[in-house]
Amino acid sequence: MSNELPPQIQNQLAQLQQVQQQAQALAAQKGQMDNIKKESEMALEELGQLSDDAVIYRAVGELQIQSTKEETITKLTEKNETLSLRLQSISKQEERIAKRFTQLQEQLEQSMGTQAQ
């Protein structure tokens, strides 16, 4: 008996590995966005402690631009809202990927069971 797997099982294994890589990439992306969101929230907290006439600089690309407290709070709040939406989207993608992974795993186990008989 040959140790080589049939093409169908090889294909299922390749699909399973691909889905696993997608899940890992999504997890990394979600972690990065979580960190950015936490930093923005901390910045908003710090801004709340400043006086309204405090001199504030914010990063715009590679520049530091003077800004008002109100404008900076607005920009950071918008950024946090956008990040929240992206995080929700990634969570939904993670759910779909997890379902697909489970489905492929079951198919592979079924194929392997059939192959062993």
Image (cartoon, helix red, strand yellow):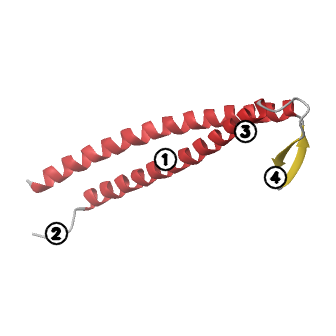
Which secondary structure lies at badge 4? Answer: loop
Which secondary structure lies at badge 2? Answer: loop
Q: CA distance from mark 4 to mark 1?
A: 26 Å
Q: Which mark is residue 3?
A: 2
Q: CA distance from mark 3 to mark 2?
A: 59 Å
Amino acid carrying label 4: it is: Gly
**2 left or right of 69?**
left
Q: Earlier in the sequence, mark 2 or mark 1?
A: 2
Q: Which residue is mark 3?
A: 43
Residue at x 60% of width, y 45% of height: 35
Amino acid carrying label 1: it is: Ala
Measuring from the top left, give residue 101's x and y in whole percent: 35, 45
Which secondary structure lies at badge 3? Answer: helix
Q: Nearer the viewer, residue 72 or 99?
A: 72
Q: Earlier in the sequence, mark 4 or mark 2?
A: 2
Q: Which residue is mark 1?
A: 27
**4 left or right of 72?**
left
Q: Quadrant of residue 41 in the image? A: top right
Which secondary structure lies at badge 1? Answer: helix
Dot 3 and dot 2 residues touching (CB under 8 Å): no
Q: Nearer the viewer, mark 2 or mark 1?
A: 1
Residue at x 41% of width, y 50% of height: 19
Q: Nearer the viewer, mark 3 or mark 2?
A: 3
User: How dense is the environment of label 3, judged by Cα within 10 Å: few (below 14), some, or many (20 and up)?
Assistant: some
Q: Earlier in the sequence, mark 3 or mark 2?
A: 2
Q: Nearer the viewer, mark 4 or mark 3?
A: 3
